[in-house]
């Protein structure tokens, strides 16, 4: 999946159907910048084990850049979904999920 998204970005998404969303948040927490790309699964020519992905409609890449004081972090996540939604809607859903995780740090400690 990473190779597909890297190649698509290199060619500036030429010939590939996709949706994109970008947002930045700053507040009491680190400054966080997010980029979300959503691509129909039919646009991914070399999807490994394609038969195992029946019912899935889109692949997603999320890049998060965080900055707190003098430390910058980058995280790239890949998702696959059965919902055919645009990047703006999916970005909100993913952000809501992360918000729940970040508001419950004690849950993470319980699993360590």
Image (spheres, grey):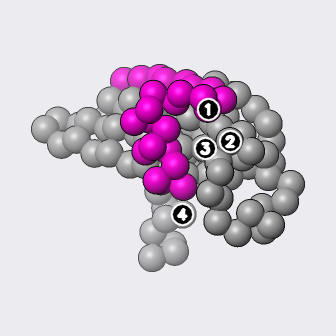
Q: Are marks 4 and 1 in contact (CB under 8 Å)?
A: no
Q: Residues within 10 Å of mark 1 (few under 14, many from 20)?
A: some
Q: Residue 57: percent from the left, percent from the top? A: 78, 46
Foreground label between 2 and 3:
2
Magenta region: which residues?
1-28
- In the picture, the disc for residue 60 is 3
State yes or no: residue 54 in magenta: no
In the picture of the structure, the residue carrying the numbered disc 4 is 107
Q: Which sits earlier in the primary sequence, circle 1 or circle 3?
A: 1
Q: Are marks 1 and 2 in contact (CB under 8 Å)?
A: yes
Q: Residue 37: percent from the left, percent from the top? A: 56, 34
Q: Are marks 1 and 3 in contact (CB under 8 Å)?
A: no
Q: Quadrant of residue 70?
A: top left
Q: Residue 78: percent from the left, percent from the top? A: 55, 52
In the picture of the structure, the residue carrying the numbered disc 1 is 16
Quote the CA–CA distance across marks 1 and 3.
14 Å
Q: Which residue is drawn at 32% across and 45% down?
A: 74
Is residue 84 visible in the rendered structure shown here? yes
Q: Which sits earlier in the primary sequence, circle 4 or circle 2?
A: 2
Q: In which quarter of the image is residue 68?
A: top left
Mark 1, secondary structure of its residue: loop
Quote the CA–CA distance across marks 4 and 1.
40 Å
- In the picture, the disc for residue 43 is 2
Residue nearest the viewer, comparing 35 with 73 = 35
Q: Which sits earlier in the primary sequence, circle 4 or circle 1?
A: 1
Quote the CA–CA distance across marks 1 and 2.
6 Å
Position of residue 77 relative to residue 13, above or below, is below
Q: Residue at x 70, y 69 (%)?
A: 49
Q: Which sits earlier in the primary sequence, circle 1 or circle 2?
A: 1
Mark 2, secondary structure of its residue: helix
């Amino acid at each position: 999946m990473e190779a597909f998204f890297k190649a698509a970005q290199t060619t500036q998404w030429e010939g590939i159907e996709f949706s994109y969303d970008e947002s930045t948040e700053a507040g009491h927490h680190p400054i966080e910048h997010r980029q979300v790309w959503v691509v129909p699964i039919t646009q991914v020519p070399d999807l490994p084990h394609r038969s195992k992905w029946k019912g899935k409609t889109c692949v997603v890449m999320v890049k998060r850049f965080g900055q707190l004081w003098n430390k910058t972090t980058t995280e790239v996540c890949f998702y696959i979904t059965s919902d055919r939604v645009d990047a703006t809607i999916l970005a909100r859903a993913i952000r809501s999920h992360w918000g729940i995780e970040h508001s419950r740090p004690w849950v993470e400690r319980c699993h360590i």
